[in-house]
C-alpha cells in the first residue's frame, strides 16, 4: 500500500526511525569510549588513545546535534503530523494500529504517513540536513546506514 519514496523521503523516514534510539546509541558510544580505546591502543600508545576518544566523542556529539535538529522540527509539526510521528515512528505502531488510535481508515493512515514524510523531508533542508550531511552521517554511523538500506530496499 505504501507509495514509492523519493530519496528525500527515504532520508526523512530514516531519521524519524532512528530518532527515538539516538540517546541509547550515544550512551553506548560514551560507555565504550575509554575502555574500547584502551583495548584498541593500549596504554603505551597515548596519541592513538587520545585520537580514538576524540573520534568517539565527535560521533556522540554529532548524533546529539542531529537529535536536537530533528526534535526542533517535530515541535513545529502540524498536530496530525506530530501524532503520526509519535505513534508510528516513536512508538512503532503499525499503520493499522495508528488508524485505530486516530479513528481513521488504514488508507487515510498510509496517506498521512506519506504526508508526514513529505513534510519532514521539506523541513530537513531548513535545519541544515541536506544530501551531503546525510551521506556523512551514513559514512560515520553504520547503524544509520543499515536502517537506510532497509528502508530503500523496500521501495
Image (tube, rainbow, N blue to C red):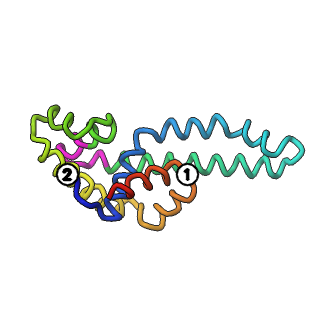
Let me know if residue 65 is in the magenta part.
no
Residue 142 shows which numbered tag? 1
Q: Name the residue at 86% across, 41% down.
A: 43
Looking at the image, residue 88 sits to the left or right of residue 132; the answer is left
State which region is magenta: 74-84
- Label 2 secondary element: loop
* Residue 10, quarter of the rendered image: bottom left
Which of these two is toward me, 149 or 92? 149
Residue 25 image offset from top left, x and y in percent: 53, 40
Residue 40 image offset from top left, x and y in percent: 78, 44
Q: Name the residue under label 2.
A: 1
**Which numbered disc, 1 or 2, marks the residue that appears first in the sequence?**
2
**Whole-Å distance between the Cαs marked 1 and 2?**
29 Å
Residue 27 image offset from top left, x and y in percent: 56, 35
Looking at the image, residue 50 sits to the left or right of residue 16; the answer is right
Residue 154 image offset from top left, x and y in percent: 34, 55
Residue that lies at the very extreme toward the bottom in this rendered image? 132
Let me know if residue 77 is in the magenta part.
yes
Residue 44 shows which numbered tag? none
Amino acid at each position: 500500500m505504501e507509495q514509492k519514496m523519493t530519496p528525500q523521503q527515504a532520508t526523512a523516514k530514516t531519521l524519524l526511525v532512528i530518532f527515538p534510539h539516538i540517546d541509547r546509541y550515544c550512551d553506548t558510544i560514551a560507555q565504550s569510549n575509554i575502555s574500547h580505546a584502551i583495548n584498541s591502543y593500549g596504554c603505551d600508545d597515548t596519541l592513538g588513545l587520545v585520537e580514538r576518544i576524540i573520534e568517539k566523542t565527535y560521533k556522540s556529539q554529532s548524533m546529539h546535534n542531529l537529535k536536537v535538529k530533528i526534535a526542533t522540527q517535530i515541535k513545529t509539526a502540524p498536530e496530525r503530523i506530530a501524532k503520526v510521528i509519535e505513534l508510528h515512528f516513536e512508538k512503532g505502531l503499525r499503520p493499522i494500529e495508528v488508524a485505530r488510535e486516530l479513528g481513521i481508515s488504514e488508507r487515510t493512515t498510509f496517506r498521512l504517513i506519506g504526508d508526514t514524510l513529505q513534510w519532514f523531508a521539506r523541513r530537513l533542508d531548513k535545519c541544515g540536513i541536506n544530501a551531503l550531511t546525510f551521506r556523512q552521517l551514513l559514512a560515520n554511523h553504520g547503524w544509520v546506514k543499515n536502517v537506510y538500506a532497509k528502508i530503500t530496499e523496500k521501495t
